[in-house]
Image (cartoon, helix red, strand yellow):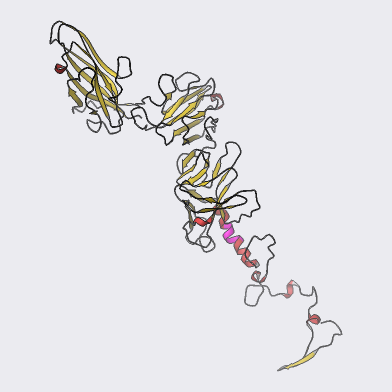
Amino acid sequence: MTSGQKPQEFYRDQYGVHPVFPVSAIIQPDEIKDSHIDWGTGAGQVSAADLPIADAGGWTEQIETEAVIQEILGSNTESIKAGFNVSGGGTVSLSAASLFKWTARIIVISAGRGSHFGTSGYFDIDMPTSGTLTGVGGTSDQTWTANGCTLSAWLALYYILPIGSNYPSVDANFRIASYTSDLKVPSTWLLIAVRNAGGLAPAKVCNGMTLLAGESRVFGGQPAPSTVILSAGSPYSLVAYAYEQHIITATTNPYIINLPQASACVGYRARIVAANPATTGLVKIVPYSGDAIGSIGADVAVYLQNVDQSGFAYRFQFIDLIATVSGYWAVIAGQFCPDQSVDTDGQQYHLGKLHHMPQGNTTSRQVYSAAPPTAGNYSAAITGVGSLGVPAGAKALRLRADITLYAAAAGAAVLALCITDNNSNAPSYYTAHAQVRLVVKAVAAADLWSYASEIDVPLNASGQFYIYTLTATNVTVASCSTYWSVMGYYMGD
């Protein structure tokens, strides 16, 4: 108490009479030091839970220091670490219209467990297919659809981790953010994807992928490329010694890829995959001026196609390229269909490798035997797959044709048979149809001539082919015979 100050009153207890002084007489400014306070976490002691905070920035809803410490060291720390423990997503895509989509859960796992984080030890993040996506930071709300949300340049998609809750995804916890208005992003907001506007405008995804417009990737598949195709006619950039897979889903037909100069890419390798949903969609790959692709000459483009003229879907709708020497891109796998000027690109047949029938098996391989059709007519459809050792899905057959000709009279006799995959485009002597032809000079009527030859016969999508009689001059067609046996088949591999 201050020297000379008198008490205002007195009180009595079992110990005697005591003076009572005013508070100002007992505690003066700056008189209480930290040593006077009973610090601790026990009952009646002063701890961080008794200390208020100012929070001038408005970063927390807590009002005392202990709660803020728990928030920073608990859920905030776990939330920050969660950004490094993200995987999954199934097929992740960014369409040409900037629609961002994933088909399977994105998962945050092994980043903590408990009421301070997630009570199941993980969080699922599923893409909503309907409802509102709340816009923040200056961008408007969006509506989720089965095709995802719009991820335009400089937008970021966040998911607010439901701290203290179970694993199920919460549709209302997504936010689409821009940078044009003030925004505080709490530590519990997990970045799902962000779109850049520089260069080829890639989208960076939380699972480690990088996507450009028109591209999709399967999580766990081929390593994500650092640069891919933006749009038709864009330059195609590669990364040295990295085996990249670029999946082209754009519907532009043809979708044009301009390769970089091979001399600047020696050792670079890439796989280009045609995933255009249109069956007639083409991906055209154009070499740099003066460069060559595969065994063809310089400045000749190649293309990828989904189906050939027979209606078969290609088994290998991709091409693997590697720059081996200056000015040359080697084709090491997949389709190799050079551009040319006679036929429309996408109509040529790609048969693949010949699978020859084993000669140690004496099973009959005869697929058809009958007299040929009369001149200008087709046989019935002949099925060449599903039996005789030819699997369903074969694109073509290697057939041995055994033909016997009966002359109708003395003189020149001609029998020409063509094989085709359809009965609507009539073959001629000058078309690309497989053909067997006998030209003989008979001495008398009923003279007999035989001929055997092996030919490759494309099949239609049903695994069938037709025999067409192109010419039957001085021939008794009904007396002729044809025997067709399978020597091998092609699978488009």
Region in magenta: 72-77
Q: Could you say which quadrant of the image residue 460 lies in?
A: top left
- Seen in the picture, residue 318 relative to 406 is either above or below; the reply is below
Give the left or right position of residue 6, taking residue 103 as reference: right
Coordinates of residue 160 in the picture (x, y in percent): 55, 56
Q: Could you say which quadrant of the image residue 449 lies in?
A: top left
Coordinates of residue 144 in the picture (x, y in percent): 49, 50
The total number of labels drawn is 0
Give the left or right position of residue 202, taking residue 361 as reference: right
Please report the residue visible at 64 percent of the width from the left and 60 percent of the height from the top: 59
- Seen in the picture, residue 270 relative to 369 is either above or below; the reply is below
Please report the residue visible at 48 percent of the width from the left and 21 percent of the height from the top: 300
Quadrant of the drawing holding the N terminus: bottom right
Please report the residue visible at 40 percent of the width from the left and 27 percent of the height from the top: 346
Q: Is residue 236 magenta?
A: no
Viewer-side residue, 236 vs 144: 144
Coordinates of residue 175 in the picture (x, y in percent): 56, 53
Please report the residue visible at 32 percent of the width from the left and 30 percent of the height from the top: 491
